């Protein structure tokens, strides 16, 4: 693949969308955000799309498994086709993606999760990490499978959990890493360097880890 079109699903503030748009515009990744789809009419992410003249649409989704949900799923597929989308990126999209999109874009849907999967799946990954008392958490970009937060992992970044952290402060630290690893995963996809083998993703010619040793938290004194 050379240059790919992205369809980005959002529900909220859209800082990951912004990082992806910025990486595209800077020529760091071989991609263009062709379409942004939101299930929330007032999502700030839509404003970010407008500011960059990216096509954007609000699609009400309704309750899971309702007729409205099924119609939204079909509408999503139509919209993605109209905009020649090659890769779907879930970026803070708080709804389950529908079966039609899942089937149409099998192995072409990425998600970002604010924890080191398989730890702390679900919608409160940062709070759950703080409350569990782990010393390290982070974020994960993975291929989306129908079951939330389960698909094959492409890239992860780890950050320390500090003694004074609450969910918000940890979320901020994690978010900074999300903005680095999501564009990177998209670029590997665009370069056709991702090979899915069962649960494992092989990145062809993968560079060595950016953190060369390990994060040990609290730090070592000896
Ligand atoms: C991110 O933490 C993402 O991992 C999670 O929802 C948040 C979305 O943030 N799924 P933003 O809308 O990209 O700013």
Image: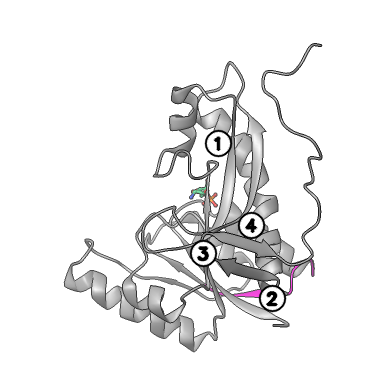
Mark closer to the observer (1, 3): 3
**Magenta-colored stretch includes residue 134:** no
Contact (CB < 8 A) between labels 1 and 4? no
Mark closer to the observer (2, 3): 3
Q: For mark 2, give the secondary structure.
A: loop
Dot placed on the residue nearer the N-terminal end, 1 or 4: 1
Q: In this rendering, is residue 189 above or below 85?
A: above
Which residue appears at 53% of the width and 25% of the height?
134
Q: Which of the 4 image quadrants contains residue 127?
A: top left
**Magenta-colored stretch includes residue 34:** yes
Dot placed on the residue nearer the N-terminal end, 2 or 3: 2
Which one is in front, 185 or 202? 202
Dot label at residue 82:
none
Give residue 169's position: percent from left, percent from top: 57, 29
Task: Find the distance from the CA under tag 2 to the CA under tag 1.
Answer: 31 Å
Which residue appears at 66% of the width and 63% of the height?
202
Q: In this rendering, is residue 172 above or below 184?
A: above
Dot placed on the residue nearer the N-terminal end, 4 or 2: 4
Residue annotated with mark 3:
198
The quadrant of the rendering that contains the N terminus is bottom right
Q: For mark 1, give the secondary structure.
A: helix
Residue annotated with mark 4:
182
Task: Find the distance from the CA under tag 4 to the CA under tag 3.
Answer: 21 Å
Task: Find the distance from the CA under tag 4 to the CA under tag 2.
Answer: 15 Å
Which residue appears at 71% of the width and 81% of the height?
3
Question: Which residues are drawn in magenta?
Answer: 27-35
24 left or right, relative to 110 = right
Q: Does any atom of ligand 1 lie closer than 8 Å to the CB of label 1?
A: yes
């Amino acid at each position: 693949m050379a240059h790919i079109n992205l369809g980005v699903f959002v529900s909220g503030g859209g800082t990951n969308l912004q990082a992806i748009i910025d990486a595209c515009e800077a020529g760091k990744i071989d991609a263009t955000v062709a379409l942004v789809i939101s299930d929330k009419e007032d999502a700030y992410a839509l404003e970010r799309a407008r500011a960059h003249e990216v096509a954007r649409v609000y699609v009400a989704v309704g309750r899971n498994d309702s007729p409205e949900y099924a119609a939204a799923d079909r509408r999503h597929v139509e919209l993605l086709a109209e905009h020649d989308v090659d890769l779907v990126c879930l970026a803070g999209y708080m709804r389950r993606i529908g079966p039609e999109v899942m089937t149409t874009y099998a192995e072409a849907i990425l998600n970002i999760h604010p924890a080191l999967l398989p730890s702390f799946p679900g919608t409160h990954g940062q709070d759950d990490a703080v409350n569990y008392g782990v010393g390290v958490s982070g974020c994960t970009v993975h291929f989306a499978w129908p079951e939330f937060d389960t698909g094959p992992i492409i890239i992860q970044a780890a950050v320390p959990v500090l003694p004074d952290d609450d969910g918000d402060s940890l979320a901020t630290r994690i978010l900074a890493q999300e903005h680095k690893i999501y564009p990177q995963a998209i670029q590997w996809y665009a370069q056709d360097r991702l090979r899915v083998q069962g649960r494992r993703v092989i990145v062809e010619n993968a560079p060595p880890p950016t953190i060369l040793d390990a994060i040990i938290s609290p730090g070592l004194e000896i």
